[in-house]
Amino acid sequence: MKVVKRDGKIVDFDREKIRIAIGKANEEVNEEDRISNVQVTNICKHIENLNKKRILVEDIQDIIEERLVDLGKYNLAKSYIIYRYNRALVRKSNTTDESILSLIKNRNNELKEENPNRDSSLVSNQRDLIAGEVSKDITKRMLLPLKIVKAHEEGVLHFHDMAYFLQPIFNSCIVNIQDMLDNGTVINGKMIESPKSFQVACMILTQIIASVASNQYGGLSIDTKHLGKYLRKSKEKFKNNYISKYKGKIKENEIDELVEDRLKDELSTGIQIIQYQINTLMTTNGQSPFVTLFLNIDEQDPYIEENRMIIEEILNQRYKGMKDKDGNYITPSFPKLIYVLNETNNLNGGKYDYLTKLAIKCSQKRIYPDYISSKVMKENYNGNVFSPMGSRNFLSPWKDEHSNYKFEGRFNQGVVSINLPQIALEADADMDLFWKYFDERLDLCYEALMCRHHALLGTLSSVSPIHYEYGCISRLNNEKIDKLLTGGYSTLSLGYIGLYEVTKLMTGKSHTTLEGQEFALKVMNKLKSSTEKWSKETNLSFTLYGTPSNNLCYRFAKIDKEKYGSIKDITDKNYYTNSYHIDIRENIDIFEKLKFESQFQKISTGGFISYININNIDYNDKFLEDLIKFVYENIEYISFNKGDYLSDLESVNE
């Protein structure tokens, strides 16, 4: 039998520890109130006979107290409770010691694997990781209800980003970069006025990104179309300068050529500033900002020509890559790129098809960009097209006081993910029990999400001026942010892992079969209806999120394998399938795969991604172009993927 300690570590059950604990309590009471060694042994046997593969240390202590009371040893039970309390006081001062020391000595494998974008051996990163371990400890002991902590440690659910819960900060956002660039902002107490040129706008953009990322714990997204205005400003400035200098001396078309050459240099340097700054800047958590650039040709954009040029340059520079320390060109992890397919670039003779061909060329070599179909997205989000918030988390549609849809300047309060396969493992194929346990665990997820919400209520805007006072989210003036938390302005996300496995456990079939699909859709609609019910009852916006955290796929499977053993096609493979995805071992055509998964994207509107694995396959241009045409018509959001099935170049938070 394995024992789960308070810090999440798993150790072998040890009778001797029970003997010592009861022995200490025995010493504190009169002889007639003590129990014998035989009775101690019987208590140990009672615990062992529960036949549990895993048990929480707190549950063992609860059982001991119950057995002492059953024996009529009330004074001894009281003594044991006092002993237990005193031990808890001691632990409060040192529960993080081992995890921190192992981190410093580079022995903490869990933290090493948690985020591959952050090297846990670097002292700059260790400072944030140490703070995170302390925050987790305080959160588990003092801030979260015990049942939520137990549920997290038992893999019932995952309380994402526990390392940041101690502070009143949120998950991810879409930066209102238009407001910040057009109206100016303040960074580190210094006024930053609206830029007069493209290069300066790019430099300010990177400083905003670093500052915003340092004051939250998730991803952030930027719509690059707002840079078009500043590229035109540069062009107008160059033209005025050249006219002033050369008018009457050279022909007008020669002036135009000089302007275009100068503008190309300005454009190239500006995009290079963004790419290099993002990959060399360090936020306060010791890593590059988790930022996404949203590349969308918007026909209503008055700066559409400039925006086209910006997107082309971003793709060209990403295709080239960046040099590593040895001078070899590599693919930078950030910024992530998302390219929007629309009527003008869907490879059906549109004006900007050449940009899509460049994007495909870039994806073949550098994985990114990801692709969003504006056609399908408009069907799913009331005619809107907008960026996810860094880590593939989508906002729900929301209108301002003028009845205009607004997405930039909004955010996500936090994520809690449910372990779907574990519900089926507990129910042991009993359908009635499954739905009963499902309801119980959804209630736990709701309570955990409300902990996220309540932790932010009452927060003053001054705790993060870049977010709440200087334009990223709002322009408040040292006031509470509560109005940004309610009414649907920000979201709370219910994530899920393992739709394939839960379907296989309950029906004996994959969710790609008719019977399996029927059950999988019932599960998804149950998740969706729960978020809708919570939203209606609370005036908050709960969304359903296909958690793209690969580490969580492994964590849930590891916990369940230790508890339930190795189960064919479930725990034996040591991972659960990401959200609604098809298991990689299924032989299915890539077009069928995307068409099948699209039905789950429509339900999981709080966030999702479908992968196209191009590992070791030399797809020709014709195939990929046909694939992109298919994506535009059939599925909202896809990403190219190399490496093993679960690889995604980044780990999304925890």
Image (cartoon, rainbow, N blue to C red):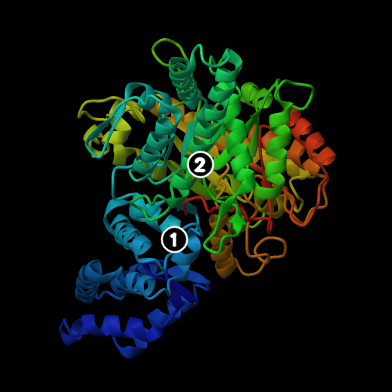
Q: Quadrant of residue 376?
A: top right
**Closer-to-camera residue (68/184):** 184
Name the kind of residue labelled 2 in the image. Answer: Gln
Relative horizontal placement of residue 598, taking residue 106 as reference (left or right): right
Q: Which mark is residue 40?
A: none
Nearer the viewer's eye, disc 1 or disc 2?
A: 2
What residue is rendered at 61% in x and 55% in y? Answer: 329
Q: Residue furthest bottom?
A: 37
What residue is rendered at 50% in x and 77% in y? Answer: 1
Horizontal and vertical percent position of residue 45: 44, 81
Q: Secondary structure at mark 1?
A: helix
Q: Which mark is residue 272?
A: 2
What residue is rendered at 47% in x and 51% in y? Answer: 653
Quote the CA–CA distance across marks 1 and 2. 44 Å
Q: Residue furthest front?
A: 249
Relative horizontal placement of residue 594, taking residue 182 as reference (left or right): right
**Closer-to-camera residue (378/451):** 378
Mark 2 is surrounded, within 10 Å at the Cα level, by few (under 14), some (14 to 19) or many (20 or more) other residues, namely some
Q: Quadrant of residue 149?
A: bottom left
**Closer-to-camera residue (130/567):** 130
Relative horizontal placement of residue 325, taking residue 22 as reference (left or right): right
Query: Is residue 20 among the parts visible in the rendering?
Result: yes
Horizontal and vertical percent position of residue 470: 29, 29
Q: Are marks 1 and 2 in contact (CB under 8 Å)?
A: no
Q: Going from the N terminus, do you reach mark 1 or mark 2 first?
A: 1
Name the kind of residue labelled 1 in the image. Answer: Glu
Q: Which mark is residue 153?
A: 1
Relative horizontal placement of residue 540, taking residue 586 as reference (left or right): left
Query: Is residue 450 among the parts visible in the rendering?
Result: no
Q: Secondary structure at mark 2?
A: helix
Horizontal and vertical percent position of residue 309: 59, 28
